[in-house]
Amino acid sequence: ASGTVYSVPSLSEAFTWCGPVALPFYEGFESMDDTFRCWLPMRNTTESGGLNGGGLDYDASYSHSWRVNLAAAQGNGAVFIRSGSRSARVIPGVSGFRWLVSRPLVIPASGNIDLRFWKDFETSPGNTTRFHIVVNDGDNWSVLQSFVSSGLPPNFFQEEVVLSLNAYRGETIRIAFVYEENGGFEVAIDDIRVARTAATVAAGLWSNPATW
């Protein structure tokens, strides 16, 4: 949360040179080598706070944290890239919540504002993937959308996820992509955009539960 002091110096280092940015915002991770710039991988547990952001700390366990995914990574990295040569990817295997937190984003006071991104996502009744998008308004973390049902269809970068940010007009926010360990599949995200749009979330997009 804004103003929170975490127990690792790299948080302040990560965001002092990555201050608030106006829209439109785009991230395809193409300018990064094997470490994030202006994004911070963090972690916490259910006991320390879970999706309310309590107990967040820097995630140093690279093998199971969010990482910059390159085409050669793990022998199958290219499968988890929508465009270009990079994406962000998380591999399951450690209990708790894995967060990927954005730099501050300045949301305009008017207009329709959407978060759009593409993801590689799979789930099943025996391996339910739990994935959340959480927003910090400067004081609190709130869940914008959770994908937790074992009956969700797969989305291998086939359809863009679109979520309205109109509730945050006029505010400076951070967005976090949160992987909750639950014995599910790995997740990758790519081509993230936050911008004004001509209309609100359209029916038929993957993020619309009516189409699941």
Image: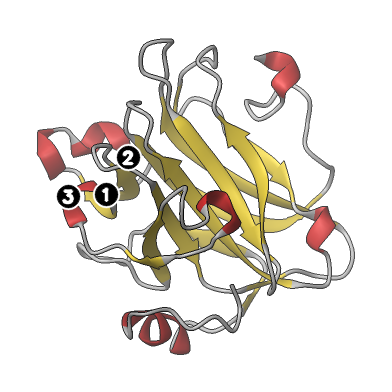
Marker disc for residue 85: 1
Q: With 197 as the anchor, is 49 left or right in this view? A: left
Taking the view exactly as shown, the residue that stands out farthest to the front is 47
Is 113 situated above or below 170? above
**SS state under label 2:** loop
Q: With 34 as the anchor, is 190 left or right in this view? A: right
Marker disc for residue 63: 3
Q: With 84 as the anchor, is 199 left or right in this view? A: right
Q: With 196 as the anchor, is 6 left or right in this view? A: left
* Residue drawn at 70 percent across, 15 percent down: 211
Q: Is residue 8 visible?
A: yes
Q: Is residue 82 visible?
A: no
The residue at which mark 2 appears reads as: 81
Marker disc for residue 204: none
Badge nearest the viewer, 3 or 1: 3
**SS state under label 1:** loop
Query: Looking at the picture, which amino acid does disc 3 mark?
Result: Ser
* Residue drawn at 43 percent across, 57 percent down: 100
Residue 10, position in %: x, y?
32, 81
Query: Looking at the picture, which amino acid does disc 2 mark?
Result: Ile
* Quadrant in which residue 196 is drawn: bottom right
Is 71 situated above or below 113? above
Q: Nearer the viewer, residue 142 or 153?
A: 142
* Quadrant in which residue 106 is drawn: bottom right
Query: Looking at the picture, which amino acid does disc 1 mark?
Result: Ser
Label located before the other in sequence (3 or 2)? 3
Q: Are marks 2 and 1 in contact (CB under 8 Å)?
A: yes
Residue 108, position in %: x, y?
80, 70
Q: Are marks 3 and 1 in contact (CB under 8 Å)?
A: no
In which quadrant of the rendered image does the N terminus lie?
bottom right
Q: Nearer the viewer, residue 71 or 94?
A: 94
